[in-house]
Image (cartoon, rainbow, N blue to C red):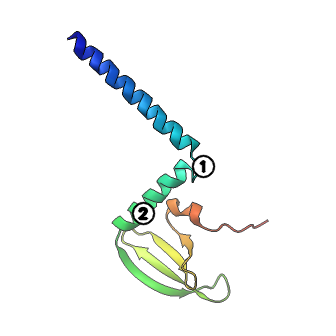
Amino acid sequence: MKGFIIAIIVIAALLIVGGGAVAYKIIQSDDDSVVDKVADKVSNVQSSSSDIVKEEIKENGQAGSGSYKEVQYEDGGFRQYDSNTGELIGSSYDSDQAKLNKGDFD
């Protein structure tokens, strides 16, 4: 019984030390922030798990000319892409907002 308790304590200590090492490595990462990485993963899962319902090219009235591609998903969300570059220019998904090019409106 005493050996079993010691084994549990050793396993718990290893998990704590290992978890701390992983957390330290993530915090010290110079790449994208952890929040951005998680948001990207959620966005990829969200778009891949929701079927496309409709795709259409629309005129860009805001810009005065040109067009954009709008993709509507089964879950009611949408994404808008520049027709020329394919760049994401609009989205109803919160996870996409950081990816959108925010203009300086001062």
In the rendered image, residue 4, in percent from the top left (x then y), is placed at 23, 16
From this view, report whether residue 13 is shown above or below residue 37.
Answer: above
The residue positioned farthest toward the top in the image shown = 2
Question: Dividing the picture into quarters, in which one does residue 97 lie?
Answer: bottom right
Q: Answer left or right for 103 relative to 47.
A: right
Crowding around mark 1 (Cα neighbors within 10 Å: few <14, some 14 to 19, many 20+) is: few
Measure the alpha-carbon separation of dots 2 and 1.
22 Å
Q: At x 52% / y 76%, what residue is drawn?
A: 80
**Residue situated in front as seen by the camera: 26 or 93:** 26
Q: At x 64% / y 68%, what residue is drawn?
A: 101
Q: Amino acid at mark 1?
A: Asp
Q: Can you tell which mark lies on residue 30?
A: 1
Tag 2–tag 1 contact (CB < 8 Å): no
Residue under numbered circle 2: 44
Question: Dividing the picture into quarters, in which one does residue 9 lie?
Answer: top left
Q: Amino acid at mark 2?
A: Asn
Q: Answer left or right for 40 relative to 75.
A: right
Q: Quadrant of the C terminus?
A: bottom right
**Residue situated in front as seen by the camera: 24 or 64:** 24
